[in-house]
Image (spheres, rainbow, N blue to C red):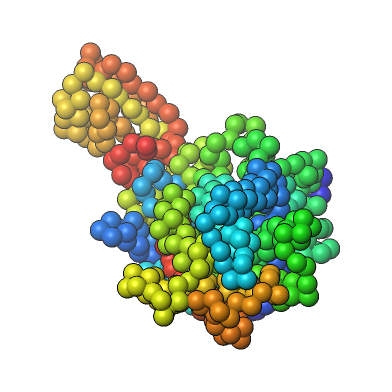
Amino acid sequence: MSTLTSGNTLATPTTTAGLAAAWMLARREWTRFFRQRNRVTAAILQPLLFWLLFGTGLRGSFTGAGDQSFIEFFLPGTVGLIILFTAIFATISVIEDRREGFMQSVLVAPVGRWPVLAGKVLGGGAIAWVQATFFLLLVYLFGAAPLSWTIVPLMLLLAIVAAGMCSLGMIVAWPMDSTQGFHAIMMLGLMPMWLLSGSFFPIPAWNDSNLGQMILGGVMRVNPLSYAMVEMRRLIYPEIDFSAAGFAPSSSACWCVTILATVFVSVLAWYFVRGSRKVDVVV
Amino acid sequence: MNSAITEQSMASGRNGRVADIVCAATDLWHTYENHEALKGVDLRTHAGEIFALLGPNGSGKTTLFRLLSTLMPIQRGTVRISGFDSHTNPLAVRRQIGVVFQSPSLDNKLTVDENIACQGALYGLTGKELNSRRDVLLDQLDLTNRRKDLCETLSGGLKRRVELVKGMLHRPRLLLLDEPSTGLDPGARLDLWNAVRAMSDEGTSVLLTTHLLEEADKADQVAIMHKGRKIDQGSPAQLRSNLGDGVVTIESTNVSDAERILREELGLFPQRLHHQLRLQSDSAAELVPVISARLGNQVQAITIGRPSLEDVFIAKTGHKFQ
């Protein structure tokens, strides 16, 4: 049996220690995801089912820009749904970590709280990104969308949206005591956010709208996710001209809004994670 | 910045040498809304010392534990660990402490090795340094052959040992253990205590909370907590010796009358506890026949025993230790 040697503590107070901690926490999210087989299966099958069922069922009742059928129109929306749900559900593990005690050991570690946020955003975002990429690969493989060079900026856009969604999930999950409460907020706030982003139905144009549609169109236009969806649609179907669609901001506007919104929710998440003592009292 | 470790006291460890003060808490108060959980607690722990916070549920020991572990902000008072102030420099304090919580803090979906690697990353330990430290601790706690197992497959005792490895991984100067024996069978408790003793022998100051009297009895120093206050402190032997050589417990059919007789006729000062009278004395054995003769048939039972920590608690509070 070995013996311990006495001496000073081995803990090192460096920024790299924080980065290593964030990376380790991100890897942990990844490992946990792949060790829960039902989660992996559901992650692959659920969006496929959603896309095929809604796309096929509503095919006859919809014609979009460039004579798109609903199954084509709904493809970017499905990718958005994958990102939204996977990223946000990944952050639900914050509540589980707290209830199962793991968070306690993180909070008394000498790295501060930013690695917790960074680890969750990096880990959860990577899961969401890979899942969306896998779905797109299947789509391209079966010829449901044309493969082109735009896949490169599309991957980048998906990564930014995934990071933003994870940060948003952290804002919701951090002060929560129960997963039930998290689900309630999800259905009340985040699901409408996706529905009102032009994922499921087009954003109405101003000129031929009645009052109700104008209000709806206004809400959809202030939703930052709408801009990411417009750009995602352009990058998935580069050959279609969407300029005549009801809502068609420029690519640069879409990228700016998406990046600014991601930065904003990330800063807000950091503010909550750093400042809140609630989590300490709960554990 | 270990130059901050300058505080020393003349307290001696088990080996008789002068030991550094590792943890110094001064005049700690804590309030939850309308409930005062801590009321001016002071304590000092030294290098190589096992220090037990003994108290029943609600005595304030868990609150004190959370303050020492930096999990809750200090409202009033100061905590210095290895010279670092917990309020002004919590990150430096966290480098000095290892914490083992009462509730498990393992990720059950990860293996033992992965949990330890996670802990290492949180404390800036990686590569060879982490591996060698992990191997030594796993070996010491007899976990080497379980290192690849998922934590969800381990028994409660084994999980506790993994928690201990996590707490000791970065070689803390102060190891905080919250109710470490909870949920363990006797064999696992023995293993845990052997590990704790080995760590303190290496110079680590170990502070544990417990409501188990036999566990506190194994510590070098015991602070007894009651209703948010520290009511006594010393080595278990010191605390017991304050009560004399023995404790006489009398059960009577008429406790009030028996108490009156002992006070007025025998000049004794018994402590009444429910249906019992208790007396601490240096000559307890000599008192028994005198009391027995005077109370006669009123006595249902009279027993004599060496003072225990429970007797210390009762003597100080007038309450049973529950």
Please report the residue visible at 75 percent of the width from the left and 51 percent of the height from the top.
B113
Q: Is residue B31 left or right of residue B116?
A: left
In this rendering, the count of numbered labels is 0
From what the image shows, is residue B275 above or below residue A19?
Answer: above
- Where is residue B99? Give x, y as percent: 58, 56
- Left or right side of B275 for B305: right
Q: Quadrant of the N terminus of chain B?
A: bottom right
Q: Is residue A166 left or right of residue B276?
A: right
| Residue drawn at point x = 74 percent, y = 71 percent | A151
Q: Position of residue B125 (x, y in %)?
A: 74, 65
Q: Quadrant of the C terminus of chain B?
A: top left
The reply to whether residue A203 is visible in this rendering is yes
Tell me what residue is drawn at x 45 percent, y 76 percent.
Answer: A205
Specify whether residue B91 is in view: no
Residue A162 quadrant = bottom right
Residue nearest the observer in this picture, B68 or A82: A82
Question: Front-most of A124 and B191?
Answer: A124
Vertical placement of residue B77 versus B211, above or below = below
Residue B40 percent coordinates (x, y): 35, 63
Q: Position of residue A213 (x, y in %)?
A: 38, 70
B93, above or below A95, in the image: below
Residue drawn at x 26%, y 36% as measured from the top left: B271
Q: Is residue B314 left or right of residue A78?
A: left
Task: Tell me where residue A245 sits by quadrant.
Answer: bottom right
Query: Which of the two residues, A28 or B233, is positioned nearer the viewer here?
Result: A28
B112 and B270: which one is in front?
B112
